[in-house]
């Protein structure tokens, strides 16, 4: 990541489908050479953003800037952006070579150069020797690779991937995640990946942008998004979490389920109503008298690498716990957690204010990793 | 026991179709071939074939049939492909398709008579031409009117297979084409047309082969100026009573049909449907 020039910027983009507001004042910038993921449930508008960037649909309001140039109304075929489609959308009437060479043929690249570049890209995507196969003769993973090859052979500045791994089975998916990541780092092309799979986004991205209801919720590195979600939606959507209502008594002290706890958050009004997030893997199971909280165990599931325990406290709040120790035959257990494990969220806080507040108190207090 | 029962039942169902095909497909074709080896004097002979191949009249007739069937197919295709393409873009597609199928429910003879009315000296077209100051013209009983009416009658049979192959195309494939830098025309020429080629092939078969043996329209609209193989067969069976020669031309026609089928079937490569299944 030698350079960090902005390659793409969306400014106050709106998109309506009839009366439905698909994108609501969306603004963001993407830097050259990074791997970005748009993450959100279906219908959140992430694919709409992708289509507006690729030019397959146009924004109703707002601007799209590519390399500083306004491309808001430029048709798809004139943009220096290529897409890997959800179901690959390979041309069924062409063989692998002609599929990959499609874009180069259109741009009247000399024949010998086309042959070299297609051969190169097929080597990179580990599909050499498949040049004369028809698309219907390829497996899902192979079609996926050809779809990527067909897009990157044109040397786009920005590659868009629309749920490109969702049609693959679990094993192949994980393998392709590694391949995508290493491909992106080798080529240095900016990747914009759209997915509803949060594990996938956390694994491959430099930066994640979480979306819901046509609005950007939060953007940041996978670790930031996971450890410091901005609101209930993000905390709930990314990973598993326990979210309980609480009150911020003062800086570094929060009250929930009727008790006061030390925490690592600050910068809020005294006695402000907040929500507290506690990740299931940050909870330690202990005896009743040693725990900060006492809960009644409801059930326990064996998940292979951990046990998943569901429980509830006296106030009826549900607590999800991930632990490596079984709690079989124990009715009541104590829960322990560190102050750093608690994450406090304000209601309706904008991302800008959230980031400012976090950086402000992190400067003075470096206890948090 | 049960499997045996099952098998015999299956055969009894199938036998109906076998009888049907034997009676109405195999037997007539066999009879035509058989008849074609008999002369007017009911003697076994190859004279009919010799006649056909050495007669300039018959060869010219064959060529005529070819040329007109080709023209009719070409005009039908040129009208039908864009029509089918725009049909796929419309909102109430089912309704439009129904409107296109509708004329095929009306008897061919009725449609031919309707055209006689429209094209006659006092018909609607000549009224219009007179109004424009260039009429009345002789429209009926010309080669042009024959080709146009034949094309009109064949259009639905061309539109439907093309339309079906066009709606089968995954919209994402068209988007991918634009995404890779193709404009509308390049997308049509490099992606949409090649993918829909199987529909065009079926359409051409459905139009070209029947057009080879048209005879009623050649009489009613073409005024018997165009003598195609179809007219010749009719003449031999009903007027000159030379069934042997009529059958010979029939056999020739069947051979031409097989030839057309093999020429237009092409190499059936992976269709869109197959790809859908995998993706």
Image: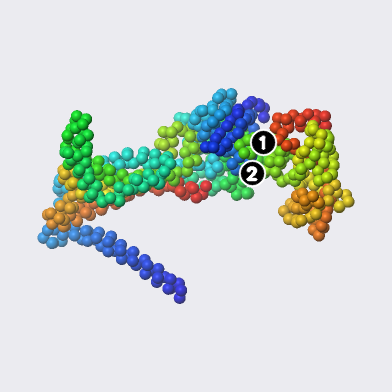
Mark 1, chain letter? A
- Kindly identify which numbered label has been placed on residue A254: none
Q: What whole-number distance in Å separates the C-alpha atoms at marks 2 and 1?
A: 16 Å
Numbered disc 2: what chain? Answer: A
The percent coordinates of residue B178 (x first, y second) are 48, 34
Residue at mark 2? A197
With respect to residue A149, does A363 lie above or below? above
Question: What residue sits 77% from the left and 49% below the top?
Answer: A317
Between marks 2 and 1 in the image, the one whose residue lies nearer the viewer: 1
Colouring convention used in this rendered image of the protein: rainbow
User: Residue B4's quadrant in the figure?
Assistant: bottom left
Residue B179 appears at what percent x and percent y?
50, 34
Residue occupying image coordinates x 20% and y 35%:
B127
Q: Can the viewer see residue B143 in this picture?
A: no
> Residue A246, percent across and down?
79, 41
The residue lying furthest to the right in this view is A289
Q: Secondary structure at mark 2?
A: loop
How many labels, in total?
Answer: 2
- Badge 2 density bin: few <14, some 14–19, many ≥20, Cα 10 Å: some
Q: Looking at the picture, does residue B133 appear above or below residue B43?
A: above
Asked whether, in this view, residue A231 is left or right of residue B196, the answer is right
Nearest to the observer: residue B187 or residue A49: A49
At horizontal 31% and vertical 66% (from top left) the residue drawn is: B19
Residue at the disc numbered 1: A217
């Amino acid at each position: 990541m030698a350079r960090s020039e902005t390659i793409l910027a969306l400014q106050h983009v709106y998109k309506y489908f009839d009366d439905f507001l698909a994108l609501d004042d969306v603004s963001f910038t993407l830097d050259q050479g990074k791997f970005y993921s748009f993450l959100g449930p279906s219908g959140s508008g992430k694919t709409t953003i992708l289509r507006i960037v690729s030019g397959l649909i146009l924004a109703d309001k707002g601007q799209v800037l590519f390399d500083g140039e306004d491309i808001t109304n430029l048709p798809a075929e004139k943009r220096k952006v290529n897409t890997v489609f959800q179901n690959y959308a390979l041309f069924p009437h062409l063989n692998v070579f002609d599929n990959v060479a499609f874009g180069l043929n259109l741009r009247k690249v000399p024949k010998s150069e086309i042959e070299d570049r297609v051969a190169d890209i097929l080597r990179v995507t580990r599909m050499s020797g498949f040049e004369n196969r028809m698309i219907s003769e390829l497996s899902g993973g192979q079609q996926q690779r050809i779809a990527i090859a067909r897009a990157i052979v044109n040397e786009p500045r920005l590659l868009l991937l629309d749920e490109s791994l969702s049609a693959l089975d679990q094993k192949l998916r994980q393998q392709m995640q590694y391949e995508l990541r290493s491909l992106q780092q080798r080529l240095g092309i900016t990747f914009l990946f759209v997915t509803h799979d949060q594990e996938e986004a956390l694994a491959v991205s430099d930066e994640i942008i979480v979306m819901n209801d046509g609005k950007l919720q939060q953007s940041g590195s996978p670790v930031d998004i996971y450890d410091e979600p901005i609101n209930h939606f993000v905390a709930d959507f990314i990973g598993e979490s326990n979210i309980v209502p609480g009150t911020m008594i003062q800086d570094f002290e929060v009250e929930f389920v009727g008790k006061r706890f030390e925490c690592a958050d600050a910068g809020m009004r005294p006695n402000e109503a907040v929500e507290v997030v506690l990740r299931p893997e940050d909870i330690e199971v202990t005896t009743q008298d040693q725990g900060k909280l006492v809960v009644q165990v409801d059930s326990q599931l064996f998940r292979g690498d951990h046990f998943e325990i569901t429980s509830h406290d006296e106030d009826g709040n549900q607590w999800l716990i991930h632990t490596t120790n079984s709690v079989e035959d124990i009715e009541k257990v104590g829960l322990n957690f560190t102050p750093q494990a608690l994450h406090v969220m304000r209601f309706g806080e904008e991302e800008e204010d959230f980031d400012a507040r976090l950086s402000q108190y992190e400067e003075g207090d470096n206890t948090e990793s | 026991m049960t499997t045996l029962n099952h098998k015999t039942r299956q055969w009894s169902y199938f036998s109906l179709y076998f009888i049907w095909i034997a009676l109405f497909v195999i037997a007539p074709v066999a009879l035509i071939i058989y008849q074609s080896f008999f002369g007017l004097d009911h003697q076994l002979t190859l004279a009919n074939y010799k006649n056909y191949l050495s007669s300039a009249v018959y060869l010219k007739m064959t060529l005529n049939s070819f040329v007109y069937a080709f023209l009719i197919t070409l005009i039908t295709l040129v009208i039908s492909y864009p029509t089918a393409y725009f049909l796929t873009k419309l909102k109430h597609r089912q309704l439009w398709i129904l409107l296109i199928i509708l004329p095929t429910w009306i008897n061919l003879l009725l449609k031919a008579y309707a055209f006689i009315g429209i094209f006659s000296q006092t018909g609607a077209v000549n009224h219009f031409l007179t109004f424009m100051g260039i009429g009345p013209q002789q429209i009926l009983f010309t080669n042009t009117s024959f080709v146009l009416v034949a094309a009109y009658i064949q259009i639905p049979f061309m539109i439907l297979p093309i339309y079906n192959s066009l709606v089968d195309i995954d919209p994402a494939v068209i988007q991918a084409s634009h995404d890779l830098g193709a404009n509308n025309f390049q997308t049509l020429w490099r992606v949409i047309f090649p993918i829909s080629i199987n529909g065009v092939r079926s359409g051409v078969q459905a139009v070209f082969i029947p057009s080879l043996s048209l005879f009623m329209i050649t009489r009613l609209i073409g005024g018997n100026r165009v003598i195609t193989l179809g007219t010749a067969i009719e003449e031999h069976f009903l007027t000159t009573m030379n069934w042997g020669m009529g059958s010979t031309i029939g056999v020739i026609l069947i051979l031409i049909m097989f030839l057309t089928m093999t020429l237009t079937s092409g190499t059936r490569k992976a269709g869109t449907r197959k790809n859908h299944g995998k993706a």
